[in-house]
Image (tube, coloured by chain):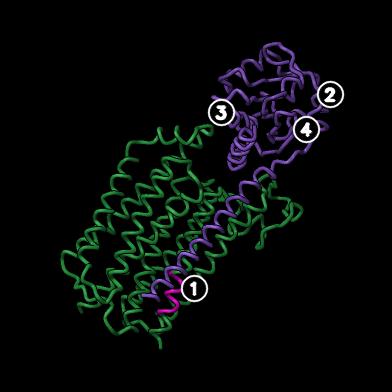
Amino acid sequence: MANKLFFRSALISTILSYLLIFVGGLVRVSGSGLGCPDWPKCFGRWVPPTSIEQIPSHIDPTAFNIVLAWIEYGNRMLGIIVGFSIIIMTVIALIYFRNNSKILYSALWSLFLVGANGGLGAIVVSSVLNPFIVSLHMILALFLVSVLSYGTIESFKLIYSSKLSNILLSKKISTSLIALWGLIVIEILLGTGIRTNIELIAIDNPLYSKGELLNALNSYKYLHSVLGFSLLFLSIYLCYLFKNDFLGLSKQLVYFIFGMILFQIFLGELMIFFELPQLTRLFHTWGSSWLVGIIIILYNTLQYEQS
Amino acid sequence: MSSLNKKLVLAFLFIFMLGSFGFFVIDKATKSRIDNIGIIGQVPSFSLTNFDGSVITENQLDDKISIVSFIFTQCEGACPIMSENMSILQERFASSNDIQFLSITTDPDYDTLDILNEYSSSYSNNNNWFFLRGDILDIIELSEKGFFLSAALLPAGHSTRLVLVDKELNIRKYYEGTIESNIFELQSDIVTLLNQG
């Protein structure tokens, strides 16, 4: 009963957090980050203004754009919903799982991360969208979904007693999976670095074309591509290691990882050779957050089987 | 297997819906930027003298995107920040011939052409920034009736706002010249106007 309760709340928190990363990415690519010049309120109101007359006199109405204000506020509202969802999850953990450190700590860490990232959101606004702080905001969100994915799969194992995979967590598989996760985190940091640098260069050179922006980047943009292809090979190797999983779940997850990396490379090349379509950027970022969570889930389906 | 296929189709549908939603939102945001710099008014005719002695009229604004400010050289509060911000914009848009800057003194008694010349050399790096003076009554009228900016108790009572004027002499938007986020906004609005042609 308590197991099911916690699993449900963890699953809902995880799904909502992934949606939040999507909406946050939408704020970034649509350039709505300054849609509300103040924080946590929007133009001094808990519900964003719908017309310019509603803006209080002490706030300069210059920046008022109703569309951008509502996009930014949508991100904040979903953030609050995620916050409440994680509070509920933590309360359940504190009541029923004080002796289960995996569950308890995943809940407490998620609560800390969601609170910290909400606070960082205020700094994002007050820093006038400093690209470093915006990227840090995204990286904290990746840590959040990692911890939530861990909590979800751990609680799933408590209610689902039969085997999830017949693959043993051998040293080879364990090392490959940890390496894949670590390299993907490095790959994400490199990608974030590229994004940050493009934005910094674009602030100083608002008239640069896409080609000029890419040329102005440091050479580690190649490192991002090279590492991306290496990840593809590593995931192919993992598909080979999991070929004998007749129970299916871990095999499906490995194929998903392979497909996702392939899709990410496709999106990446699309961005280099064509315009930088905002929607492509959005899905490229979002896809990377999926990889981080799925690998954690996969790893923990295997651990269960050994114990 | 069929249940897996069903799940895949559902997942694909969900991603497609999310993508459509993202596309809709991005499109809305892009259009809102253009709507947000609607025409506020028209710059009236004026005649002022540039620091190099040449006479500048409203014809100078023709076919250029202009950023206009009201300042005076002895001002120690807002003006240095406003001029510094305009200087940054001048540098960032240096590669475009379609942008120019106008700073009009609200203290023409003190700000002679020589003093404006000196002031210009500490902020401007190009010949697309005009530092203008004229009769104080003309300047008050230009500020209040032309640009809808308060001009009480001059010189210090001038507005600290920057004005964005398009190629057809339409006033498009105002920006607080001392606030970083407003300058950020101004910069992206200039790009929007340039992209519109």
Marks 2, 1: nearer the viewer: 1
3D distance between C-alphas at marks 4 and 1: 51 Å
Q: Which chain carries label 3?
A: B
Tint applied to chain A in the drawing = green
Residue type, mark 1 in image: Ser
Q: How far apart are marks 2 and 1 (CA)?
A: 63 Å
Q: Is residue B12 magenta?
A: no
CB-based contact (under 8 Å), mark 3 and mark 4: no
> Mark 4 sits on what residue?
B147
Query: Which residue is located at x 60 percent, y 59 percent?
Result: A73
The answer to which of B53 and A240 lies nearer the viewer is A240
Identify the subunit bearing mark 1. Answer: A
Q: Mark 3 points at which residue?
A: B93
Distance of label 3 from label 2 (alpha carbons): 33 Å
The image's mark for residue A85 is: 1
Horizontal arrangement in the rendering, residue A263 relative to residue A241 (left or right): right
Q: What element does badge 2 sit on?
A: helix
